[in-house]
Image (cartoon, helix red, strand yellow):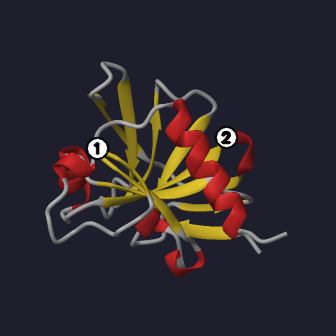
Amino acid sequence: MKLYRGGCSCRAVLFTVRRYLYVQACHCDACKKRTGSAYGLSVMVENDDVAAFSGQTRTYTRSGESGKEVHYEFCPQCGATIRWRIDIVPNRQVFAGGAFDDIREFNVVGEMYTGMALPWARLGCDLTRSGAPDDNFRASLIERANSLRD
């Protein structure tokens, strides 16, 4: 079974994921702030597919566009965002794409908040959502990611 490994910049926090559901680009302003870039890459994972997680994190919580809370975990030593949990999506967590040791192993299958995207930062994915994702969009992302797996 393929394992996906990663951690923060200083390696004080490390993780291993057995399987991911999908990878998407998020163009919301919160992701732009979180990454210091034009968008963020989000790797959605079922809680049971996190094989290992070690190291201490700190948590920052904000209210999402849905009114539900988003809880970001980051390394208190180097400040790298590792993962977050979204109250509206139970039993899943999202890992920052850049926290993986080799993000090239993943296929980005969709984009959300494209209505907020910088014109030059769109990836051109077939699956897009101008705002927040809903359950149908998430299901389409999972289906697309499954079709691209080895």
Name above or below for residue 103 compared with residue 99: below
Dot 1 amino acid type: Ser
Where in the figure is residue 142, as x and y percent of width and height? 63, 50
Find disc 1 in the rendering and name its residue: 130
Residue under the point 61% across and 60% down: 15
Residue 26 horizontal side relative to residue 52, left or right = left
- In contact (CB < 8 Å): disc 1 and disc 2: no
Q: Toward which corner of the image does residue 63 lie, by quadrant?
A: top left
Quadrant position of the C terminus in the picture: bottom right
Where in the figure is residue 99, as x and y percent of width and height? 46, 66
Where in the figure is residue 104, as x and y percent of width and height? 52, 80
Residue under the point 41% across and 72% down: 10
**Which of marks 2 and 1 precedes in the sequence?**
2
Find disc 2 in the rendering and name its residue: 47
Q: Residue furthest front?
A: 126
Q: Is residue 7 visible?
A: no
Name above or below for residue 143 compared with residue 92: below
Dot 2 amino acid type: Asn
